[in-house]
Image (spheres, rainbow, N blue to C red):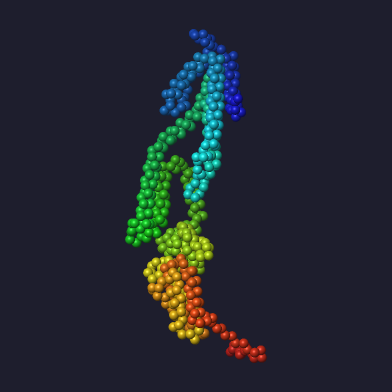
Amino acid sequence: MWNSRIRPFLLLTFCVLFYSCNILSLENGENDSPPDADGVSMPVSDATSAENSTEEPETVMEFLEEPVDKLEEIVSGETHSMNFTMRLGIALAIIVVQALLIWLSWQGFKILNRKIAAQLGHKLKPLSIKNLRILTVKQIINVILFLAKIAKYIITLFQLFITVPIIFSLFPATEHIASTLFAYILNPLKAIIRNALGYIPKLITIVIILTITRYSLRALKFFTVQIAKERLIIPGFYSDWAYPTFNILRVLLYAFTIAIIYPYLPGSESQVFQGISVFIGIIFSLGSSSVIGNLMAGLVITYMRPFKIGDRIRLQDNTGFVVEKSPFVTRIKTVKNEYITYPNLSILTSNIINYNTSSNEDEDGLILNAEITFTYHTPWTQIHEILIAAALKTKNTLSKPKPFVLQTALDDFYCRYQINVYTKEISKTAAIYSELFQHIQDGFKEAGLDMTAPHYKIILPPDIEPPQTGEQKEQ
């Protein structure tokens, strides 16, 4: 049983054969020629075609002229010596063979599809790039089956496109149609192959340029890793500059490579290609002013080195740890697990306090301070002792240098004291402050001192009016 999908192709082929036979029968009825010396009748059109066959222009590629000429001689010589019955029989045989080949190819694709669906599911893995899953196993199988289906139809169409001109070439009345159909196939192939062969020198040039670019990037990557790991030290060049500098040089190298390759690309001289390039450039220039501004600000911040990943900074009234620093934005994480994003352009115009840098560049560490107020009745020496003892009891602080107390103000009812303590544990600042306050409270409680500050308010009896000021008297 023939597959129902092959029937339209067979119907098309039989229509072609019927058309050829009708034309040939009409010509045989009107233009009969006497038999030749061998007793075989030859139509006038055959003779005319045989005489003019050598004068027709060639339609095949130059490097295929010799085999195609031999094929034309064989076909023209054999077909012109055959009668209508033999030609019809050959045409029918070609149709049967081609239909059988189409049926076999379709059956082969059916078997292939079953094997793909049954076996590849256990062998394939999802297509992923790092943590991004692009295609699942089922989607990959569907893509393979779709490509197999396209290949099946392409092969079938190719078989039909070859079969129809061959059938046309069997009959003199339709021989010119066969040449035209063959030209539809061979002329584009000839142009494609000629252009492809002519493009080979430019392609080799592009390959050489890309190879040089690839190995140049590998060399830059090697030196970048060495500098980042501080195995290679360049005076005045910090290790945290290594990867940003590598990214900048990589972009510049890619741009330089594209500029060199551009003249060797096919269609680069076309005005349409150039117009599209100009249009894309205008779109980028008009719509990316803020993007370029943030990019340049990120570049400046990188080489200013105000902070790095993991540093605890204070930025625009927010304090947190830097968790991301990209060419366009910077993100910090507060102690409350809040993520705050700042465009690099806004950071460039803001004041930044980096607590890690303060600790790393000063060997004594970062100074944490806390203020309290206390009345004048208690000697200041006792207050100093209580605060210093509380600081020494606090974990993650340094005993050397020793904590110290500063008296920052003498107010009307109390004195201001500031306890200062050194630490290297910048990431635990919030916990250090909390524990320090606890020890301060415990110290005053053990000393029998009340930390509450008295507040005084004068309340007059209702029959007494408050004294008037000079301005109130004038009014």
Q: Would you place residue 255 above or below residue 191 in this image?
A: below
The extreme right residue here reads 463
Residue 333, how many percent across, how many down? 50, 63
Residue at 41 percent of width and 43 percent of height: 263
Give the camera-side residue of 312 and 246: 312
Residue at 44 percent of width and 80 percent of height: 385
Give the camera-side residue of 233 and 466: 233
Residue 252, how many percent across, how many down? 40, 52
Tell me the quarter of the picture where residue 97 sits: top right
The extreme front residue here reads 446
Residue 210, how many percent across, how many down? 39, 44
Tell me if residue 81 can be seen: yes
Q: Which quadrant would the N terminus be assigned to in this image?
A: top right
Residue 257, how many percent across, how many down? 40, 47
Tell me if residue 259 can be seen: no
Q: Which quadrant would the C terminus be assigned to in this image?
A: bottom right
Q: Would you place residue 473 above or below residue 90 in this image?
A: below
Residue at 42 percent of width and 24 percent of height: 66
Give the camera-side residue of 192 and 354: 354
Give the camera-side residue of 419 and 435: 435
For this view, does 79 lie left or right of residue 2? left
Q: Would you place residue 304 above or below residue 474 in this image?
A: above
